[in-house]
Image (spheres, helix red, strand yellow):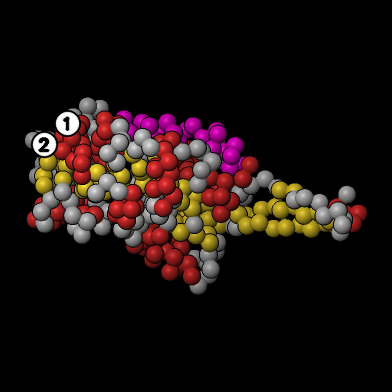
Amino acid sequence: EEMGKPKGEAREEAEGAVDKDDFLDLVQKANADELLGDDEEEGAQSLVIRDPLGVVVVISPWNFPSDEILLLALPALAAGNTVIVKPSEVTPLVGKMTVEAVTSALPPNVLQIVQGDGEVGTWLVENDDVDMVAMTGSTAVGKSIMSQCANGLKRLVLELGGKDPMIVFADADLDLAASDAVKYSLSNTGQVCCSFERVYVDSSIKEDFESKVVEIASSYKVGDGRDEENKVGPLVSKLQRDRVSEQVDAALKSGAKLLFKSSTPESAPEDASFYPVTVLGDVEQTNEIQKIETFGPVVSLATFDGTEEEAIRLANDTEYGLASAVYTTDSKKATRVARRIRSGQVGINCYSIDYANTAAPWVGHRNSGYGYHSGMDGWRQFSVPKSLVFVGSASK
């Protein structure tokens, strides 16, 4: 109820938060000692162990107020660190419940919570006793945190914003592609860092694809997220609603077409933060809505000439590089295109985060992140390796 997440999606997040057994098993493996091969000529052995960093501050976002805490705090704890969590000031109660649940299984003070706004976050980040900062949030805040950590050379993991492209070639399964374009543009009312925010469609299938998208989008009802028939809830704030509205209005003024606009609850007060499900077509690449995170229930459709080169160029025409997707029945073409897209993960005929192996890292290229979390490589960022080199009798 703090940020308006639709009830079904909130339930999924809660269920995922308590189902971490496989996740924790892999985190432990990532931190295990590693014995390297013997050097028989020198009679030596090398053992790589991992030392904790010390105090890790986790700054979590409001859009996934429970799961994002766990994705950062659990590997930090497993590596032997103490952890301080600062939840978003928008979702303090969910943050408190999540931290308390984990704290109940830990020794006193190993995991603590601090509530507050950006000023509190700044105080934590700049504190000399803090050795690492792990944060999920906007690129602007991430850059500020990086600057604040520079003097102390504090280690960082930053998962930041995105403007993720979806490419639909003419040979794609159009029913699947249209369904995914809508679902993953509107999930969590569009407030996901890896939403499909730029959908590029082969111009030869434009009309057919637009028709399918509009039909699917029209089934998404906007309303109180506590009512399960509503797939799209309110935006997190009136400020966010106004930002989305400004982007859409600017796109329409510059020539984009309004293909669909849903209703919003008639009974909602005038200052409510509901925004209608909106489908735009013929969106120009130079438009702001193709450049800046929207974070709202908008499906933004543009066309390309059907070639791999143009698809890659458009996908990479952004400062971000979080996730992306390629839809085609030609697996070789999909692989060629995916390899050249500059993003941390690429879904082939799918939304990558829904199907990625638990051990796969979650990486933001360019302005979408610094360092990375999840996966064996990501979990190891919460510790530092140390090599123990044994020679002679000590190595036997």
Q: Residue 263 shows which numbered tag?
A: 2
Residue at label 1? 215
Give percent across and percent down for residue 144: 39, 66
Give percent across and percent down for residue 213: 20, 35
Looking at the image, which is closer to me, 292 or 62?
292
Looking at the image, which is closer to me, 271 or 241?
241
Residue at the spot 16% in from the left edge and 45% down from the top edge: 280
Q: Using the rendered image of the protein, determine whether residue 82 is visible from the camera's viewpoint.
A: no
| Label 2: element kind | loop
| Label 1: element kind | helix
Amino acid type, residue under disc 1 in the picture: Glu
Q: Is residue 265 above or below residue 161?
A: above
Give the class, few, some or many, for how many residues have Cα within 10 Å of label 1's Cα (few <14, many ≥20).
some
Sequence order check, earlier mark of 1 and 2: 1
Q: What stretch is highlighted in magenta?
A: 4-28
Give percent across and percent down for residue 229: 22, 27
- Majority secondary structure of the magenta segment? helix
- Check if mark 1's residue and mark 2's residue have beta carbons within 8 Å: no
Amino acid type, residue under disc 2 in the picture: Ser
Residue at the spot 69% in from the left edge and 58% down from the top edge: 386
Horizontal side of 110 relative to 396 (left or right) equals left
